[in-house]
Amino acid sequence: MRRYGRRRRSKAPVFIFLLLVVAAVAGGFIYLSPKFERTGPEIDAPKEMFWNKDKSINITLKDNVGIKDYQVTLSDGNRQVVVASGSFAIPPKDTMITVNIPEKTGLDKSKSFWMMRITVTDTSMWNLLRGNRASKTVKLLVDTVPPVVGIVSNSPSIVQGGSGLVVFHASDKNLKDVYVEAGGVKFEVLPYKKRGFYATLVAWPFRVKDFSANVIAEDRAGNRKIVSIPFELMPKRYKVSWIGLSDGFLNGKIKEVASTDPDIPHYGSKLKIFKAVNEDMRKKNEKLIHTHTRKPTPVNYDKWRLRAFYPLKGAKVVAYFGDERHYYYKDKRKEVSHSWHLGYDLASVSHAPIYSSNRGTVVFAGYNGIYGNMPIIDHGFGLYTLYGHCSSVFVNEGDKVKAGEVVAKTGKTGLALGDHLHFGMLIQGVEVWPMDWMKRNWIKSHIDRVFKEADRVIRSR
């Protein structure tokens, strides 16, 4: 007889269920675990950039976990080469790689651009342990030719502390910047009449001994061309003075000037107050002057003709430009302070009229510490004049003044004991020897003639 019993249940559904649970747990672990993160690296590089043979390329790589390796390739459309690659023992989250492209790549340099491809992999275990990968293609504009620069005309000479003029030509299809560097100072240039031509006044800072002046042009690829301006250099010695301080001066004029500036101590040692006025206040006052005289204003070159600057009729020079002044109190061996005099002190009669010898625009008219009441006039092309210690000022900021117009009267405001004019001249914020500009023959030979020679060259091209 056949016996019947309960059928044994299959274990397959349970096994499948457990397998699904394990798979779900493993999938959840992979999905949630930082080791399996799916955020790709970032490549910080523009869509296109310029390159020359002397220029390195810097590229920033970022990743939220860590960068494993990278590779950079170049292609000219026919050939591809690896120019950089690397991996990291300690994966960084943020790093900059420097790509130095070798001189000999085998790529065609006659082509105007190459394509650069950057590929980066992170340390994630995603993508079958291969990690997340990012890539970026950059158009690399190839430019290995520096700008073309040529001096057209320039002043025949420049004196230490003095001024000069240069007109030049600069061209490049990717020209980025062009300027003159002279005595460690960068002078902005202005376009001159015809496309590709430029002009600027330059200054030889009077305290600079080893002077040179160069036109510098740079293109967007970083190629630079430096051409020397052939000035004949004329070194000049400036006066050195030792000046004794009197109690009357320290207790009178110095305290008076100090009281006009809350940053200067008004009480305490009179020598300390003098030093603060002569150095700290002077520095602040000169900063104001430089701020108002730094930029060259474009001019109509055909109408920009200058008369010799003669601001005070019948004047006598009582202090010179560039004087190095050492101050002492009673004992000459113990210096209290020192400074430099940055203009001519001219004196005639009390409250004498001060003239603007050439037309211009008033860029400042107010009180300026040791300079007292002081207007500054912009004559265009980077040339400025300054009139210090005035008893009264007849112009306001923004006024247009004519040649021969009275702008102020002499006085003794600021750090001045007697009635006089402190006459200063600046080129793009650099104080220069006024005597150059006070001579008609110098203006004719060093300024007017340079422009005329440049015009002849430009017309012939």
Image (tube, rainbow, N blue to C red):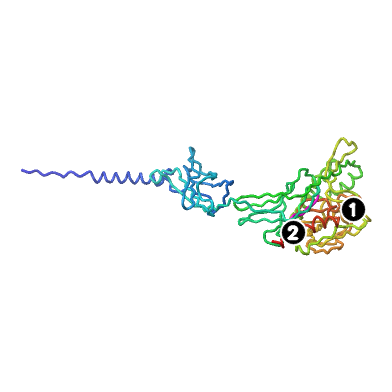
User: Looking at this view, is 240 or 274 the one in front?
Assistant: 240
Q: Position of residue 58 (x, y in %)?
A: 56, 46
Q: Are marks 2 and 1 in contact (CB under 8 Å)?
A: no
Span shown in magenta: 162-166
SS assignment at label 1: strand
Q: Position of residue 201 (x, y in %)?
A: 76, 54
SS assignment at label 2: helix
Q: Earlier in the sequence, mark 2 or mark 1?
A: 1
Image-quadrant location for residue 421: bottom right
Left or right of 119? Residue 219 is: right
Which numbered tag is attached to residue 454? 2
Q: Amino acid at mark 2?
A: Ala
Q: Which quadrant holds the C terminus? A: bottom right
* Residue found at the far left of this picture: 1
User: Separation of disc 2 and disc 1 at Cα?
Assistant: 36 Å
Q: Residues within 10 Å of mark 2 (few under 14, many from 20)?
A: many
Q: Residues within 10 Å of mark 1 (few under 14, many from 20)?
A: many
Q: Is residue 182 above or below residue 311?
A: above
* Residue found at the far right of this picture: 349
Residue 153 in view: yes
Mark 2 vs mark 1: in front: 2
Which numbered tag is attached to residue 188? none
Q: Is residue 313 above or below residue 254?
A: below
User: Looking at this view, is 97 or 198 the one in front?
Assistant: 198
Disc 1 designates what residue?
Answer: 346
